[in-house]
Image (cartoon, helix red, strand yellow):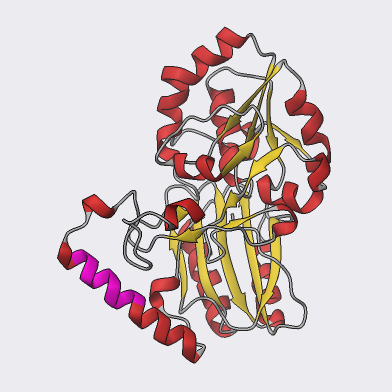
């Protein structure tokens, strides 16, 4: 889940949330949440699945709090992994409440993260855990995220999607665990949801001593002073900031509108980088018609930005 900065002088409340807890009737929950959101003109996306709830919503503070009250009234959802922010415009165009098989897709239908997840570790205790030589640290994010930044000494599975993580562990990760003789595993992700589910997966695979970073990298970057930090680089985020550093200050990366991947300062110096169109990664995989389409989209986004509007091309999903 994306961590969002706060600015109390702005008018729109944003809430990013998730919770692994059993949902007996996802369709009924979808209908109730859609009605509540529509009544308060709240916009965003919520995913409902038998394993829980995940999403981001925005609107007036009373309307957002009314939606959260509805969620808190559901059995098992008295608490949420919740991050607030303020902004001066609603960053979504509509409200979508969707029923899914999973709230974060791993493709392992028999997991029960609500009961199987590993031990939460607070950001203030994380350094001691991962500095222990008997701890194996695993990044549960995708390859391009790990390239932007990672914790010191972490194993990078270099997977292209979260769905690939189980195969990586079964074919490579378990071997690394056995070779190192580590007594425990510590896993992390951006906002906490992927590493929480990953700990449930490892426990289902017979690994008992599993830990995960509570609130993810973003809470760590908010909480731990930079001079004490074991984080190296920036943290890729699924919003228009693209990357953030300590204190959640915006990082130097921009987003390639062609492949939707982060581009650093060196990447922008490449002769293959064209703002809004392509980068070194995707230049050779796009034809002229695609580049023309991307260029027109970029032009429309710039027009919208100058007018102070939000263009559909700026929206992203976690």
Q: Count every numbered label the image shows and give the total.
A: 0
Stretch of the chain drawn in magenta: 290-298
Find residue 153 and report its horizontal and vertical position in percent: 64, 27
Does residue 119 appear in this view? yes
Among all residues in the image, which is located at the extreme bottom? 307
Find residue 62 and report its horizontal and vertical position in percent: 71, 81
The answer to whether 29 appears left or right of 285 in the picture is right
Does residue 106 appear in this view? no
Occupied quadrant, residue 233 = top right
Assess whether residue 315 is covered by the magenta stretch.
no
The answer to whether 12 appears left or right of 174 in the picture is right
Depicted 42 relative to depicted 141: above or below: below
- Residue found at x 53% / y 51%: 24
Occupied quadrant, residue 162 = top left
- Residue found at x 46% / y 54%: 262
Find residue 299 and report its horizontal and vertical position in percent: 34, 80
Depicted 118 relative to depicted 233: above or below: above
Find residue 239 and report its horizontal and vertical position in percent: 53, 63
The prevailing secondary structure element of the residues shown in magenta is helix
The answer to whether 217 appears left or right of 261 in the picture is right
- Residue found at x 56% / y 84%: 41
The residue lying toward the viewer, choosing from 151 and 268, is 268
The residue lying toward the viewer, choosing from 165 and 271, is 271
- Residue found at x 58% / y 70%: 57
Occupied quadrant, residue 9 = bottom right
Assign the N terminus to one quadrant of the image.
bottom right
Depicted 49 relative to depicted 107: above or below: below
């Amino acid at each position: 889940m994306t961590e969002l900065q706060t600015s109390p002088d702005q008018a729109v409340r944003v809430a990013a949330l998730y919770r692994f807890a059993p949902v007996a009737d996802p369709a009924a929950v979808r209908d109730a949440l859609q009605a509540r959101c529509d009544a308060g003109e709240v916009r965003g996306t919520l995913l409902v699945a038998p394993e829980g709830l995940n999403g981001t919503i925005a609107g007036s503070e009373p309307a957002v709090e009314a939606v959260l009250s509805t969620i808190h009234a559901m059995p098992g959802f008295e608490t949420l992994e919740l991050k607030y922010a303020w902004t001066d415009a609603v960053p979504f165009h509509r409200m979508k409440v969707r029923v899914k098989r999973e709230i974060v897709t791993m493709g392992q239908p028999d997991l029960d993260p609500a009961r199987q997840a590993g031990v939460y570790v607070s950001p203030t205790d994380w350094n001691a855990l991962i500095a222990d030589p008997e701890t194996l640290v695993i990044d549960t994010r995708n390859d391009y995220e790990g390239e932007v930044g990672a914790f010191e000494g972490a194993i990078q599975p270099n997977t292209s999607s979260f769905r690939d993580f189980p195969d990586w562990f079964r074919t490579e990760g378990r071997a690394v665990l056995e070779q190192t003789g580590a007594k425990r595993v510590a896993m992390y992700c951006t906002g906490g949801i992927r590493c929480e589910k990953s700990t449930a997966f490892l426990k289902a695979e017979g690994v008992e001593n599993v830990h995960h970073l509570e609130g993810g990298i973003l809470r760590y970057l908010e909480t731990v002073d930079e001079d004490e930090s074991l984080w190296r680089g920036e943290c890729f985020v699924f919003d228009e900031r693209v990357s953030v550093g300590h204190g959640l200050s915006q990082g130097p990366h921009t987003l390639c509108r062609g492949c939707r991947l982060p581009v650093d300062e060196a990447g922008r110096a490449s002769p293959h980088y064209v703002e809004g169109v392509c980068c070194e990664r995707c230049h050779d995989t796009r034809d002229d018609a695609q580049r023309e389409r991307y260029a027109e989209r970029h032009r429309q986004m710039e027009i919208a930005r100058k007018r102070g509007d939000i263009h559909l091309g700026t929206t992203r999903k976690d």
